[in-house]
Amino acid sequence: MADPKELPEGTDAVIAGASITESEEALIVREPTARDKAIEKLRGSTDKISGQAADKARELVGQGLERGGEALANVSKLVGDTAASLDDRLGEEYGEYARRAASALEDAAGKIAAKNPDELIDDTREFVRKSPGVALAGAAIIGFALVRLVKAGLDQGNNDKS
């Protein structure tokens, strides 16, 4: 029998298999607490919301690509249509410049229209990795322009109410 000095108080004998090692304790399955359940639910909600946001961003990028391609195609047509009048007014040399510009715009419109939103997002990420300073400056300029547009729209709305 084991020495009574080594046993926990109130215990007179060791039962075989009653002690648990640390590795065995790690294998014991515990019921998840309310906190664990709340964290898991929050993670699931976060994943769902981030997935929805990514889908919406792809949709908006796709719409922007489509509209940008259409706008460039329209500008290309406009420039091409003015080439003949430039031939008459300024000379064939300037008309040829207009035709080349129209062709370049048409090519750019085709490339933009053919781009997949995911490709554009990947290209943007790669550009930011390669040139973070330029990307930051561009973001600042775009942000400034958006603030000015919003402010102008708000000022216009206030003038209409007066």
Image (cartoon, rainbow, N blue to C red):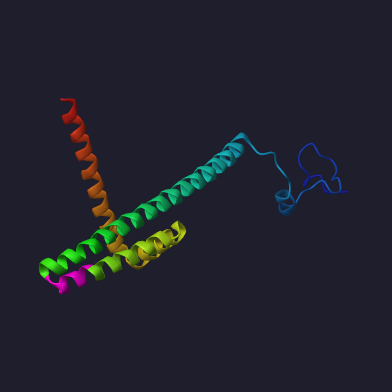
Image point 25% across, 68% down: which residue? 101
Q: Is residue 71 magenta?
A: no
Quadrant housing residue 4: top right
**Residue 141 position (above or below residue 80):** above
Image point 86% across, 45% down: which residue? 15
Quadrant housing residue 156: top left
Location of residue 29 in the rendering, given as x and y in whole percent from the top left corner: 72, 44
Q: Main secondary structure of the magenta part?
A: helix
Image quadrant where one finds the C terminus: top left
**Residue 97 position (above or below residue 11):** below
Q: Nearer the viewer, residue 53 or 160?
A: 160
Horizontal arrangement in the rendering, residue 133 relative to residue 10 (left or right): left
Location of residue 88 in the rendering, given as x and y in whole percent from the top left corner: 13, 67
Start and end of the magenta stretch?
Answer: 91-98
Image point 38% across, 61% down: which residue? 112
**Residue 153 position (above or below residue 62):** above
